[in-house]
Amino acid sequence: QVQLVESGGGLVQTGDSLRLSCAASGRTFRSWPMGWFRQAPGKEREFVASISSSGSSTYYADSVKGRFTISRDNVCHLRMNSLKPEDTAVYYCATKNTYTATALYTRDYEYDYWGQGTQVTVSS
């Protein structure tokens, strides 16, 4: 079974930065596309960022564009700068079983495997 584990969350103040990481294990490949989603208390899960299998293409939600950066090496990362209270949520990483080099995915139902999430809290 494919397993994803997020780490790096915590409690920070407005304007601070955090770097989340997502490690994959099991029957998976590091070349699969990856995505980050988040879910705030009482809210629906929403798309944050995605990266293609090749790593050459990325896409961001309007709410985080210019502040967050998704990247990949041995694991997938989400660097979050200029954090706001509105960013408070549980952050989840996900991966899709596909080999398309440049495709990007922004819908939760497009992904096949999910981690358990890591809490990010931004105080005002």
Image (tube, rainbow, N blue to C red):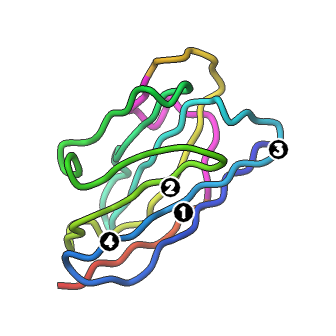
Q: Is residue 105 left or right of residue 46?
A: right
The percent coordinates of residue 87 (x first, y second) are 27, 65
Q: Which numbered marker is on residue 117?
A: 1
Query: N-terminal of the two: label 1 or label 2?
Result: 2
Q: Around disc 1, counting alpha carbons within 10 Å, would you say few (fewer than 14), some (14 to 19), or many (20 or more)?
A: many
The magenta stretch spans which residues?
104-115
Say what secondary structure mark 3 lies in: loop
Q: Which numbered marker is on residue 26?
A: 3
| CA distance for labels 2 and 4 | 17 Å
| CA distance for labels 1 and 4 | 18 Å
Rendered image quadrant of residue 121: bottom left
Disc 2 or disc 4, which is closer to the eye? 4
Q: Which numbered marker is on residue 17?
A: 4
Looking at the figure, which quarter contains the C terminus?
bottom left
Q: Which numbered marker is on residue 83?
A: none
**Which residue is drawn at the image coordinates 68% and 36% (left, top)?**
30
Say what secondary structure mark 1 lies in: loop
Disc 1 or disc 4, which is closer to the eye? 4
Image vertical order of residue 56 relative to residue 100, above or below:
below
Query: N-terminal of the two: label 3 or label 2?
Result: 3
